[in-house]
Image (cartoon, rainbow, N blue to C red):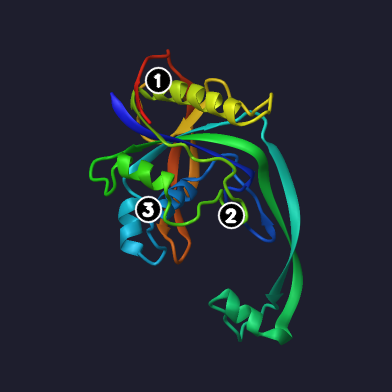
Amino acid sequence: MSQYLVFQLHGPMASWGCDAPGEVRHTHDLPTRSSLLGLLAAALGIKREEEQRLAQFNQHYQFILCASQHPRWARDYHTVQMPRETRKTRYFTRRDELRDVELRETLISRRDYFTDAWWMVAVAMTEGAPVTLEALREALVQPAFPLYLGRKSHPLALPLAPLILQGTARAILSQAQEYYQQQLSALTLRVNWPKLQPDMCWWEGEHEGLTAQKSLQRRDQPLNRRQWLFCTREVFQGTLDKEESCTCQK
C-alpha cells in the first residue's frame, strides 16, 4: 500500500513547454515534470534563486498523470521585439536587449496552448524527500506564490482540491476521478464536463496497479533553473489494472 497526493489542474488556457526552436513555442499534451515541480515549489514558497534547495526537492517525487479526452488546441501570434544578430554585442537579459533601441526589429512568435482541458495528478515521494505529502497538500491549499498552468497568463480556474490517498495506484486514481467528477458536477451547470481518457495514464517509476504498454523519453527533468538546463527521463504509458479499494484523507 502506497501513499499519494492527488490534485486536479484546470484552466481556460494551459501550455506545457517543450523544445522551442525558432519562433514557434509548442506545448506538450501533458504537464511536464519541470512544470509540476515548479508548481509544488511555488506553493511551498521556494524561490528560483534557491538552487540547492530546488535541486534537492526535484529528486524525490514521482508523478502519475491522467488527461481529459479531446482537449481543444489553439495557436496565437505575438509580436516580439528582438535585437538584430551581431557578433560584437552579447545580451545577458531581456532588459539588455530592449535597451538597444537602434538594433530592434519585430518578429512574429507563434505559441500553442490547450483550452478547457483537465488533468489529474498523483504524486508519490521517494526515500529522503525533503517535504512530506501532507505538507505539500497544505501548501496547495494555501500556496505561498501564485500558481499557473505553464505560463503566468494561464491561471487556475478551479481549486487544486488536493487529497491524500493510500492504496494501489489503480485504486487511488479511480477514487480520485470519481471524487473530482462529483465535485465538478456540483460546482458547475455544465452537462458535458471534460472526462479523463478511459483507463489510460502516464507515469515515472514503479507503481502497483499500472501496466505499461510503451515507454517514452521526455526532456523535462530540471538540472539548472537559471541556465534552463534539462535532461531526459523515461515515462511509461499504459492502462489501469483491476480496480481495488483505498483509504482517503481530505
Q: Which amino acid type corresponds to the residue marked 3 in the rendered image?
A: Leu
Residue picked out by circle 2: 151
Give the position of the N terminus as an image quadrant.
top left
Counting from the top left corner in percent of width and height, residue 52 is at 31, 62
Residue 70 pos. (x, y %): 67, 30
Determine which quarter of the picture holds residue 196. Answer: top right
Disc 1 packing (10 Å; few <14; some 14–19; many ≥20): many
**104 lies left or right of 41:** right
User: Looking at the image, which residue is at 28% across and 40% down?
Assistant: 126
Q: Is residue 198 above or below residue 116?
A: above
User: Any mark on residue 171, and which?
Assistant: 1
132 in relation to 66, above or below: below
**Distance (Cα) linking label 2 and label 3:** 18 Å
Snapshot quadrant of residue 162: top left
Residue 113 appears at what percent x and percent y?
A: 66, 47
| Callout 1 touching callout 2 (CB < 8 Å) | no
Q: Amino acid at mark 2?
A: Arg
With 54 as the anchor, is 17 left or right in this view? right
Is 180 placed left or right of 224 in the picture? right
**Mark 2 residue element:** loop
How many residues crowd mark 2 within 10 Å: few (<14), some (14–19), many (20+)? some
